[in-house]
Image (cartoon, rainbow, N blue to C red):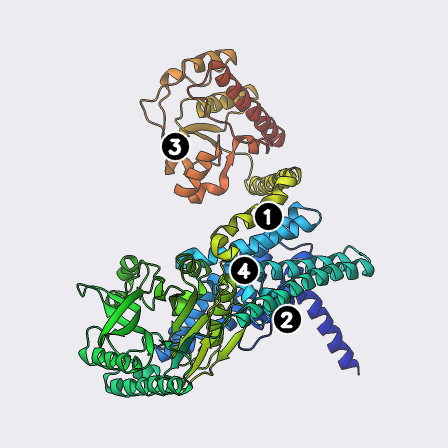
């Protein structure tokens, strides 16, 4: 029993001493569990609350601790979210260790944004006494601005932004037609910060439980407001779609389920052709038997053609025959994913081609070349730089990025654009297609690389948000799944499983409505930026006080450092060296006046020298210096024989203390003669003046400025010599 009590006591102490670390790790686990395929949307609403609390709770927390907690939390979360990269590398034929390194690098990169967010919380804690509603709005906006930054920096990697966690929460995400996925992120992070602040107020500031409940009720009420708005929008849109005339268009999604190892192997070329022929013909006969519609669009996955469509006659004839056959008794179109060469065979494109048959001839209606390529998958960023260090980079081929936001047109009412693979994760890119005239969207992809990891599920959910943001149907054909049809409300109408061969047919009348986000989504970051700045505009006095306090603390730290170094130096000194820039004024006067005072006090065993960091022999002493020497009766140094001396190792080595005039000399000695830095001090600091401790060069100024400089030096030397004499006695 005694052992149990000791163990329990030890456990309690351990928890109390490490609760911040536990909170940070808890946040990372909850953030990971907010996304598919393992997670649940509920966790996102409080996933970051423990991490925020870990910063708010601990009064002695410092920047290093904030960096540690946020960095650890971010890395753990993103390693979990992005683990699928490892098997992807293995499928690509690379060693698994490269996959591990890639996961770590990407996780570290994504964690930087969490670190910046946590540093902002720490900064706000130092500046503002209370976290009012404006502060919470500002912090939430900063999170969204960081998501925007992650979406564009280094070509962009907006994978699993916080808002994507709510892909199944259709009523809530209906506001994406105004705010996009970033708006959903804003709401979620707002709730996280709000919960953290109110828990902190309840525990630390001893706010009443009734006030806590009241605040929670407010959040629930706002949530319900968004929820019922979403319910209503879904009903209105679904009613409109159902009320339209009968479906006059048929969609066929093909899922070939071609193994990644077979895809580019010439030995499996005919097997792949046979499989797609079978899928096309089965779906064709089903439509004919149903006698449903005359117009049909067959959608093939990305790179479904096992080679170069326009360069390989066998492949070209195969596609030609299929298009011809499916145009018997039907008006059929095929959107086919293929790789192709440029006009002069000097570049390669990942493309989508719209094909039909016109008078027994294959008609190429339009071609779209993928615009946003996958870094290191389809092109090598910074090739010229990386190639110098990594030889294999120069051996890698790459695709060329397309330039046009192509809109395919079947008839006046049937216009669409194609998003190839990775492009569906970029909201602004998709909006450009819709603004160019697309009425519905097609996403073709090959997710065979991802096997059965969480990546295919994560990749699929981006499309749910693109359909809501632009209020249009989105049709997705994936080589190994997940293929599906998503309505303008984000509802998944049909969906395939992973790694199954098949097709499905969907008859529809396309619904589309231009949204606020489609038109202005690219400018919404400005609103978040304004919200972020509001506390800074309303609390200017607090911010000024914060920087004054920081400056004082910095001065105290510097003062402590200087005093510690002064204590280390043994007195009395045998040699004092004064250093300025040109060794013609400040250090010369300091040398002369020090010698004068030492003679006055009868000290004759100390040598005083001076030099400059940029001194040259031809530098001349200002005429006013002679007046000052006469004024203070300095006869111990002869100005007529003075020659400017440049700082050197011998001078520094033979000096017991080095006194400089400003930080220019401090930095020069630190950089060029680091071994003497510990015995180098600003003259004013050594005399005890830690506020404005620099004596600046009066070069080119009126004589009155020279006199003021001399008075500063004189006062400092008098204090130092008096203390020295007192110590000696």
Between circles 4 and 1, the one closer to the viewer is: 4
Q: CA distance from mark 4 to mark 2?
A: 22 Å
Between circles 3 and 2, the one closer to the viewer is: 2
Tell me the element at label 4: helix
Q: Residue at x 32, y 58 (%)?
A: 404
How crowded is the residue under tag 1: few (<14 C-alpha within 10 Å), some, or many (20+)?
A: many
In the picture, which quadrant includes the N terminus? bottom right
Q: Earlier in the sequence, mark 3 or mark 1?
A: 1
Residue at the spot of label 3: 613
Residue at the spot of label 2: 42
Measuring from the top left, give residue 6's x and y in whole percent. Answer: 76, 77
Question: In the figure, is residue 113 to the left or right of 351?
Answer: right
Measuring from the top left, give residue 108's x and y in whole percent. Answer: 48, 63
Tell me the element at label 1: helix
Q: Residue at x 35, y 84 (%)?
A: 284
Q: Residue at x 33, y 88 (%)?
A: 278
């Amino acid at each position: 029993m005694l052992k149990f009590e000791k163990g329990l006591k030890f456990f309690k102490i351990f928890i109390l001493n490490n609760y911040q670390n536990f909170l940070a790790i808890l946040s990372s686990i909850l953030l990971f569990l907010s996304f598919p395929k393992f997670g649940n949307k509920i966790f996102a609403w409080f996933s970051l609350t423990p991490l925020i609390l870990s910063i708010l709770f601990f009064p002695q927390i410092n920047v290093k601790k904030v960096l540690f907690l946020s960095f650890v939390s971010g890395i753990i979360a993103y390693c979990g979210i992005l683990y699928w990269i490892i098997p992807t590398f293995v499928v690509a034929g690379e060693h698994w260790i490269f996959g591990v390194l890639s996961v770590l690098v990407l996780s570290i990169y994504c964690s930087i944004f969490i670190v910046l967010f946590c540093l902002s919380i720490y900064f706000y804690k130092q500046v503002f006494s209370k976290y009012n509603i404006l502060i919470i709005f500002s912090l939430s906006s900063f999170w969204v601005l960081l998501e925007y930054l992650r979406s564009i920096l280094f070509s962009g990697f907006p994978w699993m932004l916080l808002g994507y966690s709510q892909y199944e929460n259709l009523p809530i995400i209906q506001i994406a037609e105004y705010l996009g996925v970033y708006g959903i992120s804003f709401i979620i992070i707002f709730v996280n910060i709000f919960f953290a602040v109110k828990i902190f107020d309840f525990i630390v500031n001893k706010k009443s439980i009734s006030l806590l409940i009241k605040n929670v009720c407010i959040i629930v009420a706002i949530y319900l407001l968004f929820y019922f708005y979403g319910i209503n929008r879904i009903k209105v849109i679904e009613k409109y779609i159902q009320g339209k005339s009968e479906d006059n268009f048929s969609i066929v999604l093909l899922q070939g389920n071609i193994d990644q190892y077979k895809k580019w192997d010439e030995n499996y070329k005919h097997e792949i052709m046979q499989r797609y022929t079978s899928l096309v013909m089965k779906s064709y006969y089903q439509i004919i038997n149903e006698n449903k519609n005359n117009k049909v669009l067959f959608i093939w996955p990305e790179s479904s053609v096992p080679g170069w469509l326009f360069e390989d006659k066998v492949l070209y004839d195969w596609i030609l025959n299929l298009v011809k056959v499916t145009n018997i008794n039907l008006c059929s179109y095929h959107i086919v994913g293929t790789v192709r060469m440029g006009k002069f065979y000097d570049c390669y494109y990942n493309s989508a081609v719209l094909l039909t048959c016109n008078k027994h001839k294959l008609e190429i209606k339009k071609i779209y070349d993928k615009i946003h390529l996958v870094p290191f998958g389809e092109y090598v960023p910074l090739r010229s730089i990386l190639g110098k260090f990594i030889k294999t980079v120069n051996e890698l081929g790459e695709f060329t990025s397309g330039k046009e936001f192509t809109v395919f047109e079947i008839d006046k009412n049937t216009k669409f654009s194609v998003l190839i693979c990775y492009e569906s994760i970029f909201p602004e890119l998709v909006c450009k297609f819709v603004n160019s005239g697309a009425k519905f969207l097609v996403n073709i992809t090959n997710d065979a690389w991802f096997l059965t990891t969480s990546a295919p599920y994560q990749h699929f959910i981006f499309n749910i948000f693109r359909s809501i943001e632009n209020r249009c149907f989105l049709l997705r054909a994936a080589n190994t799944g997940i293929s599906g049809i998503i309505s303008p409300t984000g509802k998944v109408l049909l969906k395939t499983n992973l790694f199954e061969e098949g097709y499905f047919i969907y008859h529809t009348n396309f619904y589309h409505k231009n949204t606020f986000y489609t038109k202005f989504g690219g400018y919404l970051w400005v609103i978040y930026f304004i919200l972020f700045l509001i506390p800074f505009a309303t609390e200017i006095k607090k911010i000024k006080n914060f920087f004054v306090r920081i400056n004082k603390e910095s001065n105290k730290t510097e003062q402590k450092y200087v005093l510690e170094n002064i204590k280390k130096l043994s007195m009395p000194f045998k040699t004092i060296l004064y250093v300025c820039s040109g060794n013609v004024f400040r250090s010369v006067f300091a040398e002369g006046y020090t010698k004068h005072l030492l003679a006055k006090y009868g000290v004759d065993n100390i040598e005083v020298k001076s030099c400059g960091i940029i001194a040259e022999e031809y530098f001349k002493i200002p005429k006013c210096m002679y007046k000052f020497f006469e004024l203070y009766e300095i006869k111990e140094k002869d100005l007529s024989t003075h020659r400017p001396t440049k700082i050197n190792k011998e001078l520094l080595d033979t000096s017991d203390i080095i006194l400089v005039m400003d930080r220019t000399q401090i930095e020069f000695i630190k950089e060029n003669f680091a071994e003497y830095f510990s015995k180098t001090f600003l003259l004013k600091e050594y005399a005890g003046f830690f506020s404005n401790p620099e004596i600046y060069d009066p070069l080119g100024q009126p004589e009155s400025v020279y006199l003021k400089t001399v008075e500063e030096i004189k006062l400092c030397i008098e204090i130092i010599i008096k203390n020295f004499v007192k110590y000696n006695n």
